[in-house]
Image (spheres, rainbow, N blue to C red):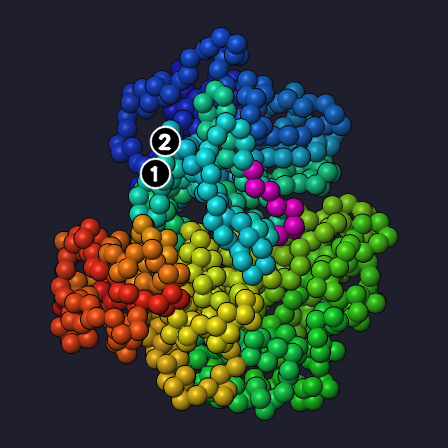
């Protein structure tokens, strides 16, 4: 009997797998739900996708299978690269079993190559939100070692895909977007930094010409892995176009002894008619996890840009007093509290409270903060060590390094080998001891350098893969011992933003740069995968510490309003006017955060790139909060209309100001009709359809201003 194509369907997504005579099933389709499909139509869909044999080509045309290989005629990027001491380079797998589970949302494909001594299990799954996840497990069933050099996961692209979007960046400017044509050949984004890196793309997407946030078929892939990795877009001369993702392995890093297995990280694919829909699938899926934060995200004050290394108790108490009076709910003590740490040149690894600075331990500041009704948080950088530290002097063999020498330093520090059981036990013991001694609700987990020459000091073998596995185990164990603990993943700001780390933490620090102009871009593209409640968004001081630019308090406060809200600023000596404005935005955030952290994030596609309109529409679509920002002087004056995506088309909304005190921005321009109506207490009433298609006139703003607009249905 001829094998039947498999159809996975859930969450508005379909995947069709077509049997292949030379091995693993063909990825015949991934995209919008095909609806109810019987066996006959499935076979017709598969038949319709089969290519012709052409002159100059292989007699059996190559297809994009779950694991494309040369043995099936594939000459693009191979799905598996590995060998047995230089032999068995070209496996050919035979499917031994296929099964559907979860009411047709999960497929498991088993295959083997007895000659090569390999077994393969492919697990494909559609989540309730319509994400398409894949994972491969390769098992050595032979009698000698098999080295895995690469094992990749593939996602077919829609025929309309002609343009690629990804992000790049650096420290203080992560996730800057870039676009280019999808042309014949391979476009690869590779990270060998031991973490994704500040220049990594959080998503590799490809879609129809000019796809935007509101419309245009687009597909994207993310690798849920916190170490070395690659994502690529490729178009072959035979017409195949696809995205792929894999862990990047060093030589001899994964060598399977007989009976051992290697599993890839999970690759996650999303699609949509526009990036808003694509990102909404990620957000809904993350919010459905059992581990997702359920309680309101506490407004947080972090002390770093307020005091840096100055650990003066009275100054910190004054800062805490002021924070509590503003409505801050969590106070985080940053770097500088542990033994010998007066600057960033020494003491990482010596995780003991500094008795010369804290003669009574941390209890005086912890107790003071908690007496004010706030939670207490503490900064750690557990994976790092300064050569100038007691730990490094006693245990130099715990530092990742090639034979006999340290890698080049970064921020005067090196990386601990968490894969070394003794180093792992020490770090776990010290963190556990401090978390057990004090009432600590939150850990800011930092990671301030890339991994270079990440080798085991004892053997010289590559240790990057093992380090990530040990990091995950460490986080899991700390969460097991302290189940109420929340952890932030910070890595020189936003250099480790991936779904692997977010499976074990409660938010990411989006960037060390809090300049609102930089943050508008950073937060927009981080949000392609990460929902706002998992993104730290803080109000910085009047002059950005990382760019030197000065911005008004309303602009700084409004830019952070949608995420996990916080303050990174010495607020102990605010003027009365500053205190009033900051308190107003804290209260605005807390009044909205239930909807901000459960609703759908939307971005408007506006013709003028200086105009930025983004918002969050509540889950029931009864109300929405939008921020309209002018990031530079507009080419149009007045600038034109704002259109609002994501609303219920047939519902009617009152168009109001979230902060009426903003009044008429723009330095005395003539009143704008809808804005004046809102100020007069009689906001205009417009349907969601009219707001999406006709919109309202944008107010004239000065560059680097934001106006927060509230839309609400009438009761």
Residue shown at 70% from the left, 31% from the top: 146
Residue shown at 46% from the left, 25% from the top: 240
**Circle 2 sits in a helix, a strand or a loop, which is it?**
loop
Q: Which quadrant of the view contains residue 412?
A: bottom right
Q: Which quadrant of the view contains residue 208?
A: top left
**Residue corresponding to mark 2:** 160
Magenta includes 138? no
Mark number, residue 217? 1
Residue 218 vertical position relative to residue 54 in the rendered view, above or below: below
Q: Is residue 434 left or right of residue 553?
A: right
Q: Quadrant of the N terminus?
A: top left
Residue shown at 37% from the left, 61% from the top: 633
What crowding class fits label 1: few (fewer than 14 Cα within 10 Å), some (14-19), or many (20 or more)?
A: many
Q: Is residue 506 left or right of residue 36?
A: right
User: Which range of residues does the magenta coloring cover?
Assistant: 188-195
Q: Residue 171: give x, y in percent of width and height.
A: 59, 59
Q: Residue 154: give x, y in percent of width and height.
A: 50, 33
Q: In terms of sequence position, does the residue under pointer 1 or pointer 2 come before the other?
A: 2
Mark number, residue 240? none
Are dots 1 and 2 in contact, CB under 8 Å? yes
Residue 346 appears anywhere in the view: yes
Residue 567 vertical position relative to residue 67 in the rendered view, above or below: below
Residue shown at 38% from the left, 65% from the top: 703
**Circle 1 sits in a helix, a strand or a loop, which is it?**
strand
Q: Which quadrant of the view contains residue 629?
A: bottom left
């Amino acid at each position: 009997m001829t094998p039947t194509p498999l159809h996975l369907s859930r969450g508005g997504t379909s995947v069709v797998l077509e049997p292949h005579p030379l091995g693993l099933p063909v990825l015949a389709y991934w995209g919008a739900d095909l609806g109810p499909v019987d066996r006959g139509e499935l076979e017709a869909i598969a038949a319709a996708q089969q290519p012709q044999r052409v002159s100059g080509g292989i007699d059996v045309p190559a297809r994009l299978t779950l694991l494309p290989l040369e043995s099936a005629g594939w000459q693009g990027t191979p799905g598996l690269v590995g060998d047995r001491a230089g032999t068995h380079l070209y496996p050919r797998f035979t499917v031994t079993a296929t099964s559907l589970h979860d009411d047709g949302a999960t497929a498991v494909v088993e295959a083997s190559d007895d000659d090569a001594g390999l077994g393969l299990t492919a697990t494909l799954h559609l989540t309730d939100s319509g994400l398409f996840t894949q994972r491969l497990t390769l098992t050595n069933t032979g009698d000698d070692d098999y080295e895995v050099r690469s094992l990749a996961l593939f996602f077919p692209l829609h025929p309309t895909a002609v343009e690629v979007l990804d992000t790049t960046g650096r420290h203080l400017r992560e996730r800057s977007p870039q676009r280019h044509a999808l042309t014949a050949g391979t476009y690869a984004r590779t990270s060998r930094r031991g973490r994704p890196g500040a220049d990594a793309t959080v998503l590799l997407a490809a879609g129809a010409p000019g796809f935007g946030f509101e419309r245009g078929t687009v597909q994207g892939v993310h690798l849920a892995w916190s170490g070395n990795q690659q994502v690529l877009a490729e178009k072959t001369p035979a017409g195949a176009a696809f995205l792929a993702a894999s862990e990047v392995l060093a030589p001899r890093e994964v060598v399977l002894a007989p009976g051992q297995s290697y599993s890839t990280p999970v690759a996650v694919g999303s699609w949509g008619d526009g990036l808003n829909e694509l990102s909404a699938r990620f957000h809904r899926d993350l919010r459905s996890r059992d581990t997702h934060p359920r309680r309101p995200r506490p407004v947080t004050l972090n002390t770093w840009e307020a005091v840096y290394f100055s650990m003066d108790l009275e100054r910190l108490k004054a800062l805490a007093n002021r924070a509590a009076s503003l409505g801050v709910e969590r106070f985080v003590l940053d770097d500088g509290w542990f033994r010998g740490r007066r600057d960033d040149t020494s003491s990482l690894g010596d995780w003991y409270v500094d008795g010369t600075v804290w003669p009574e331990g941390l209890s005086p500041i912890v107790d003071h903060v908690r007496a004010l009704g706030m939670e207490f948080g503490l900064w750690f950088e557990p994976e790092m060590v300064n050569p100038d530290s007691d730990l490094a002097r006693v245990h130099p063999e715990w530092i990742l390094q090639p034979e006999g020498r340290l890698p080049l330093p970064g921020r005067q520090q090196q990386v601990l080998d968490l894969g070394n059981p003794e180093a792992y036990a020490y770090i776990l013991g010290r963190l556990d001891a401090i978390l057990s001694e004090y009432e600590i609700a939150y850990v800011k987990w930092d990671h301030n350098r890339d991994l270079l020459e990440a080798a085991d000091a004892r053997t010289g073998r590559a240790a990057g893969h093992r380090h990530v596995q040990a990091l995950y185990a460490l986080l899991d164990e700390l969460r097991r011992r302290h189940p109420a603990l929340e952890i932030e993943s910070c890595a020189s700001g936003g250099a480790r933003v991936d779904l692997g780390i977010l499976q074990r933490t409660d938010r990411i620090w989006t960037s060390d740069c809090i300049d609102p102009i930089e943050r508008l871009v950073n937060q927009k593209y981080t949000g392609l995968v990460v929902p706002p409640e998992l993104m730290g968004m803080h109000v910085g001081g009047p002059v950005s510490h990382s760019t030197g630019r000065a911005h008004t308090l309303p602009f700084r406060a409004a830019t952070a309003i949608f995420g996990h809200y916080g303050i990174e600023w010495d607020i102990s000596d605010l003027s009365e006017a500053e205190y009033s404005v900051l308190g107003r935005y804290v209260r605005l955030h807390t009044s909205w955060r239930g909807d901000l952290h459960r609703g759908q994030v939307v971005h408007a596609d506006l013709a003028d790139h200086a105009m930025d309109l983004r918002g969050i529409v509540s889950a029931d679509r009864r109300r929405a909060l939008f921020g309209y920002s002018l990031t530079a002087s507009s080419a149009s004056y007045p600038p034109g209309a704002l259109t609002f995506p994501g609303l219920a088309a047939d519902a009617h909304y009152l168009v109001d100001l979230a902060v009426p005190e903003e009044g008429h921005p723009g330095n005395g321009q003539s009143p704008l009709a809808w804005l004046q109506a809102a100020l007069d207490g009689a906001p205009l009433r417009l349907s969601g359809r009219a707001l999406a298609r006709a919109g309202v006139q944008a107010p004239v703003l000065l560059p680097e201003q934001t106006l927060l607009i509230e839309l609400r249905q009438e009761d």
